Structure formats: C-alpha cells, structure tokens
C-alpha cells in the first residue's frame, strides 16, 4: 500500500501495546505439579530470599556430615558393616529434622493465610482441597529428602565399600519406607500447627515443642517403665512421639534393628502402632482441609 | 445454533434470580443481571452485596438459589473453567511481603495454567503495562500502597483473562495514583479488550471510566443502565464566582432580577438555562458586579442522584 519511498525510518522502538496470550493453557494436573515443585523448592529457600536459604541448607549439611564421616571411617577401616543402621539414623539426627520441618512448615501453611495470598490461589483453577494436598505433599517431600539423603549417602558408601549388596539394599529399602512414613507424619503435624497458629514464630516454636518434647518425654517414660518392668507401658508410650512410632513400625513389621527403647512386642501393639501412624497422617490432613475451608471464604 | 453462540458471547456475566442468604442477612436478593463487554461499574454501599456477588461468580461461594453464568459457563458446574478465564483483584491486602512482584507473577501465571516460559514473558509484559519498572525485582513488603495496588492488578491480568473482576482497585490511593489506576482500568476495557467488572463505593470514579453502571442496594438491583443515561444533561448551569465574601449571593440576586431562575448551590449558584442568551446574561451580571468568574459548568446528573432519589424502595426485578 505504501511505496518504499515514504516508508518510515527503521530502528524506532515502538510500544507494541497489549499482546493477548494465545499459547497453550495447562490442565489442573500440570498446575498442581507446578505448585508441588515450587513448594518443594521454597522449603529449601530456593526461589525465596537469600536469607531464607541459610537455615535449610545448614540443616541439610549437618544431617549429611555424620553420614559422610561414618562412611569414610567404615570404608577406611574396612568394617564388615556400617556402625549405624539406616533406620536408626533419623533418631540420631531427630533434632535437625525437627527444626527443619518446624521452620519450613510455615512457609507452606501460614504465609498464605497470614498475607491472605490464599485468595489469589483460590481465584485460580486449582480446587481448595487440591491446593492443600499439594502443599502437604511439597512439605512431606522436602522432609523426606532431608531424612533420606544421609541414608542414601550411607548406602552408596556401603555399596562402594564392598559391603554385601543384598543385605545393605534390604536394610536401605526398609529405612526408605520408614523415612517416607516419618516424613508424612512430621509434615502433617507441623503443617497443622502452622495453619492453626498462622504466626510464623509461634508456629515454629510450637512445632519444635511438639516434636522434641514428645520424643524426650516418650523415651524417658520408656526408660523408666522398662527399668521397673512395665513393658506394656513402655511400648504404648512409643505411640506418642513420631520418631518412636515410626521406628517401632519398622522394627516390628520390617525387621529393622531396634532404634528407640521399646518397640511393639505383640501383634496387638503392632496393630495399634499402624493405627496410630494412620491417624497421625489422616487427622492433620483433615484438620488442614477444615482450616482452609474456613479461611478461604474471605 | 450460531445465534445462540453469539448471544452467549454478548453476555459476559448473567444472573437469574441469584440469591444468597446467610442465617442473619440476605446478601443478594433475586438479582437479575446481564453484563456485556466493556467496563461495567458495580456501585453500592458497603454491605450492598458486591463482594458476595464476585465470590459467587468465581465459584468460591455457593448461591442459595438462582443461577449465574460467566463467559457462558455455569458457576455451579464449571467454576474451574471460569477461574481459568477470569482475573480477580481482591479488595484486601493479599500480597506476600517476602517475594518480588516479578517472581510472584510468574508463579501465579503458572497457577493459572501458563507454561513457565510463557508465564515469565507475560509477567514482564503485564508489569510494564501497570507501570512497575525496576521495583518489580524488589520484595513487595517495601512497596507503597500505589505500587501494591498495581501489583495486585497485574496478577489479575497475568494469564490474559477474558474478564477481570476488580474489587475496589482505588482503595487507599492518593488522588494522582487514583487517576492513574482509573486510566489503567479504562485501558484494560478498551485497549486490552478485556471485559471489566469494577466495584467502588465512590460513584464519581465509575462515572468516569464505565460504559455501564449497575447499582446494588442491600443485595437488590437498583438500576442497571449505560453510564450516559445516568449522566444526561439537566439543563442547569453551575456558576462559581469570587471577589467578595457574599459574591454568590450578589450574583444570585442579580440573575433573579434579570428574570432567570437561580438558586444557591453551596458556594456557587445554579441557573436554569432557557436558551443561548442565558450565558450572556450570566456573563454580563458577573462583569457588572465586578466579580471574578471561576467556573461555568453544565450540570450533569450524577449516579449519586439515583440513590438520592430514594430509589431503594422502587426496585424493579427486571
């Protein structure tokens, strides 16, 4: 239409105005996956401020350090087996794990309520329940990574150090299953505490109290009860702390070496441990769903 | 068939007998609406049912009875489809303080179904349109209210919705930011081609930017019509003068003496315009009195007048 002679000079920056988006739009499943990955990254401070990376990374380093030393020593000395059981490792580092889960749960479960960012999520395609479950999955996966990473390190070290592969693999598999259950239980409890308290500092303190104090009290009660011959009391006490609960399950059902004082000794007690573990996962998740149902109609 | 599709496209938001009852109050009472493209203002006092309506449209709140459709989807059965096509800017603070606007928008874009690369591109585009430049990389916690409102608006646009629901977008803004925000809302409806439903309790704002105004009162539809109908000229001239303390009274008297109908309106005088000569009479009167003419303005009816006419009683469920 316009002849070449009256064309405008090139090289001018134009404001191209508003450009509509005509590309693909993802479905609910892919959105949920994206939320899961973001949540998992955020638990380790990735995609957040530099300061929020410090604590999770230090904790990760600290849980890996003993495993690294153990592997090094075992391989150097040519020990016939690792001096520490895979399934017992989380009990040794329970302080680090508790601090990690307690400090990161508010990232998933109170930031959105405190800043009311939840409204922005609910105005988007994901359903409320999907949102809550995906956040729970992110926190569980982050906790699992922290619990499992040193066990993996031990396992790789053991295999490279020419320990019997069959035996090590079996023990490692048992520990992996236990780590998964432990991660789910810890994430559920701390998530619920965070969602209920909403304030970050309070949530962290309350979660640490719940996790650490429960374990200390339980092991003390177990010690006293065993000394005085009340074995059933000692076993039942194990139900009331996540670490002893999960360790008891591993020992009774999967034949892991004893890690906490009094694992279940009878079928009845074993069943009780299973029930307790199920409730420890299901009840907090139901609590979370209720909490968000109430919070979400803002 | 084609006709039906066209009709669906014409109606962006439609409600029939939409009712929401809480145990103690009725938030929406048999509301019938038919909202089309362009910018639609939703006016009502606090508690008139504006926010309730928006939540029902997003499928976040079930209606007690009646039905509603958004972009051709039923809110009761297809709320997820609706939420993928609609952007929502809440009235209250909803931005996390510890992330940057850029990061937040990329994430929320993905939450609306954009692939990561597209979300990044859209986030940058939209932030530029709302006028957040370098500050987009700083944590939102340090933003001014104006910048926060812009970021809130940006997140409603990041997925290129077909409709945006803006709840009180000018809340807490100073006059100049308010003007910027209103201009932006107007642009969204015109240049961007996105349908807009914007609420406010400040009527003057909606007069300036809306094609269509819906007035809610206690959950009922008070009036729904084009903005121009609200603001038809009333044939009254507003005259403001200065120079003496009793300048307005002097002028009023002079105009009445000249045979015009004039009455005081605050510190100004309103004059009934009879014909072209009325303007000359007013000018001459001002000059004769040695006063300074500050304003000579045709008086339009304002949306406020709908309320003032005591319309609350005369509801017509269309």
Image: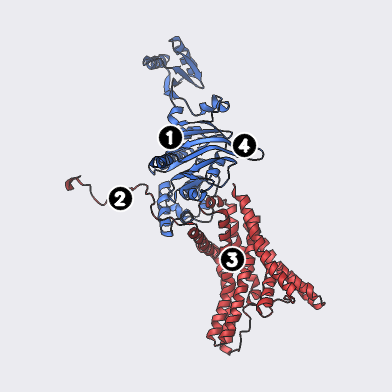
Residue at horizontal 73 percent and vertical 71 percent from the top? A238
Chain A display color: red
- Which residue matches tag 1? B211
As drawn, is A73 to the left or to the right of B193?
right
- Name the spot of residue A52 as percent of width and height, x first: 55, 63
Pick the residue in front: A284 or A83.
Answer: A284
- Which residue matches tag 2? A13
Tag 2 and tag 3, C-beta contact below 8 Å: no
- Which residue matches tag 4? B26
Q: Element under label 4?
A: strand
As drawn, is B227 to the left or to the right of A62?
left
Q: CA distance from mark 4 to mark 3?
A: 43 Å
Q: Is residue A117 above or below residue A248?
A: above
As drawn, is A59 to the left or to the right of B248?
right
Mark 4 or mark 3, whichever is nearer to me: 4
Specify whether residue B295 is in view: no
């Amino acid at each position: 239409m316009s002849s070449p002679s009256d064309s405008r000079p090139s090289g001018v920056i134009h404001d191209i105005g508003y450009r509509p988006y005509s590309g693909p739009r993802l479905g609910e499943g892919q959105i949920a996956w994206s939320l899961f990955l973001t949540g998992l990254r955020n638990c380790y401070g990735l995609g957040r401020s530099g300061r929020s990376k410090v604590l999770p990374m230090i904790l990760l380093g600290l849980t890996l350090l003993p495993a690294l030393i153990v592997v090094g020593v075992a391989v150097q000395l040519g020990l016939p087996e690792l001096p520490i059981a895979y399934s017992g490792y989380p009990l040794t580092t329970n302080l680090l794990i508790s601090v990690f889960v307690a400090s990161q749960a508010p990232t998933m479960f109170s930031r959105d309520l405190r800043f009311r960012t939840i409204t922005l999520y609910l105005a988007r395609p994901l359903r409320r329940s999907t949102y809550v479950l995906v956040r729970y999955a992110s926190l569980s996966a982050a906790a699992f990574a922290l619990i499992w990473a040193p066990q993996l390190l031990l396992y790789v070290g053991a295999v490279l150090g020419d320990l019997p592969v069959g035996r090590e693999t079996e023990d490692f598999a048992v520990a992996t299953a236990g780590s998964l259950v432990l991660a789910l239980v810890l994430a559920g409890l701390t998530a619920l505490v965070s969602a209920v308290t909403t304030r970050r500092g309070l949530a962290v303190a309350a979660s640490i109290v719940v996790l650490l104090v429960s374990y200390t009290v339980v092991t003390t009660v177990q010690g006293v009860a065993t000394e005085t011959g009340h074995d059933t009391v000692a076993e039942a006490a194990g139900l009331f702390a996540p670490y002893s609960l999960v360790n008891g399950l591993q020992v009774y059902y999967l034949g892991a070496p004893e890690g906490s004082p009094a694992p279940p000794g009878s079928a009845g007690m074993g069943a009780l441990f299973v029930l307790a573990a199920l409730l420890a996962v299901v009840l907090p998740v139901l609590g979370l769903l209720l909490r968000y149902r109430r919070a979400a109609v803002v | 068939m084609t006709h039906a599709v066209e009709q669906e496209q014409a109606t962006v938001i439609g409600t029939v007998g939409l009712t929401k009852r809480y145990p103690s109050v009725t938030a929406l009472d048999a509301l019938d609406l038919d909202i089309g493209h362009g910018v639609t203002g939703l006016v009502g006092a606090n508690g008139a049912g504006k926010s309730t309506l928006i939540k029902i449209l997003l499928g976040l709140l079930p209606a007690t009875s009646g039905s509603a459709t958004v972009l051709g989807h039923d809110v009761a059965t297809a709320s997820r489809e609706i939420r993928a096509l609609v952007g929502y800017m809440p009235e209250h603070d909803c931005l996390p303080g510890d992330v940057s606007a850029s990061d937040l928008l990329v994430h929320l874009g993905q939450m609306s179904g954009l692939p990561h690369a597209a979300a990044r591109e859209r986030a940058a585009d939209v932030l530029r349109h709302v006028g957040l430049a370098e500050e987009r990389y700083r944590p939102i916690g340090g933003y001014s209210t104006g910048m926060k409102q812009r970021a809130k608006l940006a997140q409603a646009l990041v997925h290129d919705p077909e409709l945006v629901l803006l709840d009180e977008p000018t809340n807490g803004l100073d006059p100049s930011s308010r003007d910027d925000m209103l201009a932006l809302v107007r642009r969204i409806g015109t240049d961007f081609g996105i349908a807009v439903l914007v609420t406010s309790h400040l009527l003057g704002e909606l007069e300036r930017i809306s094609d269509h105004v819906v007035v809610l009162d206690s959950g009922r539809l008070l009036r729904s019509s084009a903005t121009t109908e609200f603001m038809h000229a009333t044939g009254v001239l507003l005259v403001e003068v200065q120079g003496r303390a009793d300048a307005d009274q002097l002028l009023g008297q002079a105009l009445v003496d000249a045979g015009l109908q004039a009455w005081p309106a605050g510190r100004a005088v309103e004059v009934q315009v009879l014909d072209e000569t009325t303007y000359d009479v007013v000018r001459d009167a001002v000059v004769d009195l040695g006063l300074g003419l500050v304003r000579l303005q045709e008086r339009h009816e304002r949306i406020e007048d709908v309320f003032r006419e005591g319309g609350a009683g005369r509801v017509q469920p269309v």
